[in-house]
Image: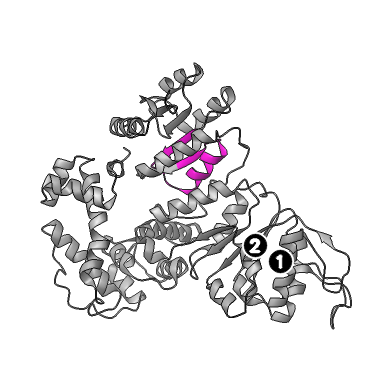
Amino acid sequence: MPAGLVLVCDDDSAIRTVLNQALGRAGYDVRTTGTAAGLWRWVSAGDGNLVITDVVLPDENGFDLIPRIKKIRPDLPVVVMSAQNTILTAITATERGAFDYLPKPFDLKELTSVVQRALASPAGKRDTTTERREDRLPLIGRSPAMQEIYRVIARLTQTDLTVMIMGESGTGKELVARALHDYGKRRHGAFVAVNMAAIPKELVESELFGHERGAFTGATNRGVGRFEQAEGGTLFLDEIGDMPIEAQTRLLRVLQQGEYTTVGGRTPIKTDVRIVAATNRDLRQLIQQGLFREDLYYRLNVVPMRLPPLRERAEDVPDLVRHFLRKAEDEGLPSKRLEPEAFDMLKYYRWPGNVRELENVIRRLAVLHSGDVIPAAAISIELKEPARLADPTEGEEPTSLGAAVEQHLTKYFLAQGEKLPPPGLYDRILQEIERPLLSICLAATRGNQIRAAHLLGLNRNTLRKKIRDLGLEVIRSLRAD
């Protein structure tokens, strides 16, 4: 075997063909099958150095197959593919012992990189006893940006690495911190959240580390700090950029030595707490201003996570809206739904308050709107947007792909409240439209470049050149049934 034998299991013959060709070009031997039974025969016979399997198979769930594989061949790495792209999918893959999880559609170069890493470092046994909360998803969204967040969370749940979550207000930083705790090995301990911006500066140290009786005026009894409350669990330090310098020095000692002293105390106290910090500020700028310790920044920024603002994942808006409407219904409100046009308005809005703002809008509409169907007009009033500017495509169905692109861009710019787009329109349109346009057309034709070229009105050789220049992979066009 030149570089290892890869066993591929997927009921989609197109995916099997593409993976067979791509991995073969990379120097691997490949066997493909469309059933779990076929994969199991090879694994039980001792064949293969790596397994790549879909979750939904015709004869067995791929997640149920992984423990069986691990029982007889614990060092055989398994990579899971799935179109069921939620955080529970990523977490379940990790819990069952998968080496990695790839959401569909995926990038072929990324898959090849995962295969290389898996063969270089076998997965081995992993903890499969995590109790999952399946009643509610802690995070909502299937966009590529959220898929990457899910994958990072899945990799971090079985570690104690310090995490720094960065993102605008309302993007869900505390939800990510809770997911790291609830699905991790510290889930049986306490999750304690502290907002640094909400505590008076003179009380921050006492709040975090506790105080002894008589440590300061008014300290009539010993005070328990948040570190003590979070012992064995997770301490979430929100808005860490607002922490006073004095408290930063104490926190640095905890991260360096694993111990602290209470305010007014002299005896060091050992602590076993996982730290997850979050900020919506630029900490590097605060460092330059002398407001944040650089050494503390590097101690906290072990694993950085950036949460995308809602405007960067507008495709998640419909799922979020339906989630918030179900949540309102669970709280006793009547069942409601939105007009299709209303979803378009919500997707094109900028959402300066991000997911928090969207939730507030939907909850208000669920309470105040009397009808079962919430119309687009109600959304427009709720968002306090002025009457729409003249839109040349308003009320018209796009008659061509070019017209659809034009209509999308027009709405995009109008939604930003700009009468005219900013300079550099030509290059920006090419950058924002060409790559996704080609990817969508390839997906619509299931990777058939001749049909995609015809749909686009391009010469086949021109399309091939654009695919090569843009670094697109045909695998991105494949969809799971």
318, 202: nearer the viewer = 202
Looking at the image, is 362 positioned above or below residue 273? Answer: below
Asked which secondary structure carries label 1, the reply is helix
Asked which secondary structure carries label 2, the reply is helix
Callouts 2 and 1 close, C-beta under 8 Å: yes
Residue 84: horizontal and vertical position, in percent? 41, 43
368, 435: nearer the viewer = 435
Residue 185: horizontal and vertical position, in percent? 66, 46
Position of residue 223 in the picture relative to residue 279 (left or right): right
According to the image, what is the colour scheme of the structure? one colour
Position of residue 289 in the picture relative to residue 49 (left or right): right
The crowd level at tag 2 (other Cα within 10 Å; few <14, some 14-19, many 20+) is: some
Q: Residue tagged by mark 2?
A: 299
**Looking at the image, can residue 104 be seen?**
no
The crowd level at tag 1 (other Cα within 10 Å; few <14, some 14-19, many 20+) is: some
Residue appearing at x 61%, y 51% in the figure = 182
Q: Residue tagged by mark 1?
A: 252
Looking at the image, is 36 positioned above or below residue 141? Answer: above
Position of residue 46 in the picture relative to residue 204 (left or right): left
Position of residue 413 in the picture relative to residue 301 (left or right): left
Residue 110: horizontal and vertical position, in percent? 40, 44
Residue 88 counted in the magenta span: yes
Residue appearing at x 13%, y 65% in the figure = 396
Q: CA distance from mark 2 to mark 1?
A: 8 Å
Quadrant including the C terminus: top left
Residue 374: horizontal and vertical position, in percent? 33, 65
Residue appearing at x 36%, y 45% in the figure = 107
- The amino acid marked with disc number 1 is Leu
**Residues shaded magenta:** 78-101
Furthest-front residue in this view: 2
Quadrant including the N terminus: top left
